[in-house]
């Protein structure tokens, strides 16, 4: 949802496949997204389980700890034939590992992963909601993978003894035939390996309100630029700026102007010019 929100803010027309409960939180969510211009046409309604809730807590290092309530309505997304065409016609199909923590949503996701389109896996390894077999299956279906440094270390530790960052990314890319691997590293920036080439960005120093949703904004920024034909280096800079910008706001889906992204990039470039 967060990725879709930022894609919409950048002028795209994303679609969401999910399920909400017949409760006040579900109604508020539908109303909020509708107000932002996001389509809720593909939402399902659950009469048994509540709308999904996540309790987030930020520590002194601005790391976020999540309590993802289980079970929730989105654990029971049923297959609908319209989903196949929806995904096939999309430029990207973005999915996460949490959507496969229960059988019903996992079965629906697996069917969608057989649909021909560019698949983007945004891994979210939240204990206890993952296992190696499922994660490896999701990885095999992806063309683009986004994960953080801790997730990179955990996954590559399953089948490799490599310790260096670039070695870990390389073995992951080769093992699962991934076109693009994106690794975010918080205050240390991010790294992208695409078609064998490594690209780095140190990130943008900002005053952090909280980091909730920054990674989702980063992914939206990358895909937005990539879909417009920008180079990987340009996509990396834009994604880093959007992720940093969202960290200056409280919450994952703040109201902001896309021009603020360019302002952040240009201010960084001006700083480099003045100090060079």
Image (spheres, grey):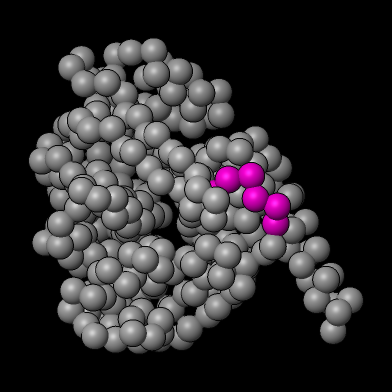
Is residue 208 a member of the stretch shown in magenta? yes
| Magenta stretch secondary structure, dominant | loop
Q: Quadrant of residue 241?
A: bottom right
Question: Which span of residues is magenta-colored?
Answer: 206-211
Please say if 211 is above or below 1.
below
Taking the spot 84% from the left edge, 84% from the top edge, the residue there is: 276
Q: Is residue 204 left or right of residue 4?
A: right
Taking the spot 27% from the left edge, 68% from the top edge, the residue there is: 154
Q: Quadrant of the N terminus?
A: top left
Please say if 172 is above or below 120.
below
Query: Total marks drawn?
Result: 0
- Is residue 109 something one can see in this rendering? no
Is residue 255 a member of the stretch shown in magenta? no
Taking the spot 64% from the left edge, 44% from the top edge, the residue there is: 209
**Where is residue 200 shown, x and y percent of the image?**
55, 78
* Residue 119 vs residue 192, the one in the foreground: 192
Taking the spot 38% from the left edge, 43% from the top edge, the residue there is: 66
């Amino acid at each position: 949802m967060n990725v879709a929100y930022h894609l919409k803010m950048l002028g795209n027309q994303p679609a969401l496949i999910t399920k909400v409960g017949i409760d006040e939180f579900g109604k508020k969510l539908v109303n909020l997204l509708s107000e932002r211009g996001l389509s809720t046409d593909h939402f399902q309604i659950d009469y048994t389980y509540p709308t999904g809730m996540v309790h987030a807590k930020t520590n002194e290092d601005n790391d976020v700890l999540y309590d993802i309530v289980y079970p929730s309505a989105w654990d029971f997304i049923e297959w609908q034939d319209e989903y196949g065409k929806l995904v096939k016609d999309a430029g990207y199909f973005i999915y996460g590992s949490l959507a496969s923590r229960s059988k019903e949503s996992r079965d629906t996701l697996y069917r969608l992963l057989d649909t021909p389109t560019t698949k983007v896996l945004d891994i979210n390894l939240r204990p206890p909601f993952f296992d190696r077999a499922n994660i490896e299956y999701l990885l095999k279906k992806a063309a683009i993978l986004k994960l953080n440094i801790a997730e990179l270390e955990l996954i590559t530790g399953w089948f490799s003894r490599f310790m260096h960052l670039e070695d870990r990314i390389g073995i992951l890319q080769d093992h699962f035939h991934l076109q693009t691997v994106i690794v975010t590293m918080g205050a240390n920036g991010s790294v992208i390996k695409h078609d064998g080439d490594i690209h780095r960005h140190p990130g943008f120093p900002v005053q952090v309100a909280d980091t909730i949703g920054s990674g989702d904004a980063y992914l939206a920024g990358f895909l937005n630029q990539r879909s417009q034909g920008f180079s990987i280096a340009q996509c990396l800079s834009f994604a880093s700026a959007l992720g940093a910008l969202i960290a200056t706001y409280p919450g994952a889906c703040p109201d902001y102007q896309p021009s603020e992204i360019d302002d952040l990039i240009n201010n960084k470039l001006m700083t480099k010019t003045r100090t060079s």
